[in-house]
Image (cartoon, coloured by chain):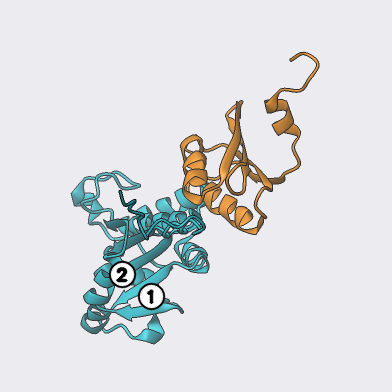
Chain colours: A orange, B cyan
Amino acid sequence: MSETATQHEVNANADATDLDCSGLLCPLPVYKAALVLNELEDGELLRLITTDPGALRDIPAMAHQRGDTLLDITEEEGRQVFLVKKGIAE
Amino acid sequence: MTQVVSPLVVDDVAEPKPRQKRIALVASKGTLDQAYPPLILASTAASLGWEAGIYFTFYGLDILHKERFEKLKVSSLANPSGPIQLPNILGAVPGATAAATKVMRKWMSDSRMPTVPEFLEMTRDLGVQFFACATTMGVMGVEEKDLIEGSDIAGAAAFLDYAAEADVTLFV
């Protein structure tokens, strides 16, 4: 895999709508993410940044309940970056 | 030998759309701290794509009351987990409830949490249904014009009819 990008790198560079929920507590990251996802077309991506540790459980649960697809989670220095695809992955 | 074919087997029927989930909440308390949980749960449920409704009853009706929802308080008396820790004898001192309320409001704004009126608006804009308990209105002299726009006046039977179709029901 030295020459080709890993799936994680592909995800990190994917074209997505960005939403920064740093400093916000439950329910605001889920609330704001849902408002963005409601406006996206199926297959479009949301990149969500959170600092609420509860988001590590909440965002996967949100995707599961809404029928969206969580493609990637990155944890770094007290923040989490989620890549969510609207709708079910093909 | 006769082959039996079920008339119910049809190949080209689309998968039925899964039924939308529903949460039915009762908000029975009119303190600042207890106004938040039903609003947090209902706004989250609506964000997950669920139907959500809150039945505001007894003191909980103050959350819908236009002149009261900005003045909800936290008691300093008999509230051992409250924002200020006081022995009950001091919790009864005039001004102690106002002080506890001030501290909680500061906690909320420092954490960038919406106020109760802001939260109500967010929640209503997500399509959450607000049921105002008709009996409470009669007992406490509350009129429809006192409540925020979009409040549905309803009795217990109407709420139970809604709650009977719910996947989650909680009493706050």
Secondary structure type for disc 2:
helix
Query: Which one is nearer the viewer's eye here, B75 or B86?
Result: B75
C-alpha distance separating marks 1 and 2: 22 Å
Viewer-nearest residue: A27 or B2? B2
Q: Label 2: which residue? A: B162
Using the image, tell me which numbered label, if any, was put on residue B116: none
Could you tell me the amino acid type at mark 1?
His
Secondary structure state at the residue bearing disc 1:
loop
Dot 2 alpha-carbon crowd within 10 angstroms: few under 14, some 14 to 19, many 20 or more: some
Position of residue B166 measured from the top left corner of the image (x, y, whole percent): 32, 61
Q: Please name the residue shown 20% across and 51% down the image.
A: B78
Q: Is residue B112 visible?
A: no
How many numbered marks appear? 2
Considering depth in this image, is A85 or A33 the residue closer to the camera?
A: A85
Q: Choose top left, top right, bottom left or bottom right for residue B23.
A: bottom left
Identify which residue is drawn at 73% across, 30% down: A10
Marks 1 and 2, the one that precedes in the sequence:
1
* Callout 2 amino acid: Tyr
Q: Of all residues shown, which one is farthest toward the top?
A: A2
> Residue under circle 1?
B65
In percent of width and height, residue B123 lies at: 48, 64
Q: Around disc 1, counting alpha carbons within 10 Å, would you say few (fewer than 14), some (14 to 19), or many (20 or more)? A: many
**In the image, residue B66 above or below residue A47:** below
Q: Position of residue A38 (x, y in %)?
A: 60, 57
| Chain identifier of the residue bearing label 1 in the image | B
